Image (cartoon, grey):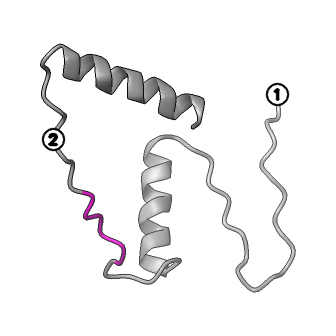
Amino acid sequence: MSAREEVLGRIRAANAAAGHPAPPEVPREYRTVGAHQAGAAELLDLLRDRLLDYKATVIDAPTDGGPRPSPPRCVP
């Protein structure tokens, strides 16, 4: 038994002794597929737009395996 399991077991036992009901089961039915393939141009454009909204620096790298562009530099 790991330390984590031991601590959680103690918490569950204390809650049971105090008359607290067990927490409800949380549904874990996550969506695993979407309308687009991973890496689709539409998704990359959406990600790029959202990153730019947060003032992030976005560097477009070539997808053909060519040389990567140099990162931007701050010039005083």
The picture quadrant where one finds residue 35 is bottom left
Judging depth in this view, the residue of 19 and 40 nearest the camera is: 19
**Image position, residue 48 (x, y; %):** 50, 60
Q: Would you name the residue on which mark 1 appears?
A: 76
Q: Nearer the viewer, residue 54 or 9?
A: 9
Q: Amino acid at mark 1?
A: Pro
Q: Is residue 19 left or right of residue 40?
A: left
- Viewport quadrant of the N terminus: top right
From the viewer's perspective, is the residue at label 2 or at label 1 nearer?
A: 2
Secondary structure of the residue carrying tag 2 is: loop
N-terminal label among 2 and 1: 2
Q: Which mark is residue 24?
A: 2
Quarter of the rendering containing residue 20: top left
Disc 1 is placed on an element classified as loop
Q: Position of residue 73 (x, y in %)?
A: 81, 42
Indicate whether residue 11 is drawn in magenta. Answer: no
- Asked if residue 41 is positioned above or below residue 8 in the image, the reply reads below
- Residue 32 falls left or right of residue 20: right
x then y, percent, for residue 66: 84, 81
Q: Tell me, yes or no, whether the two marked residues, 2 and 1, touch with CB atoms within 8 Å.
A: no
Residue 31 lies in the magenta-colored region: yes
- Magenta stretch: give its range: 28-33
Instruction: Locate the C terminus by quadrant.
Output: top right
Q: Identity of the amino acid at label 2? A: Pro
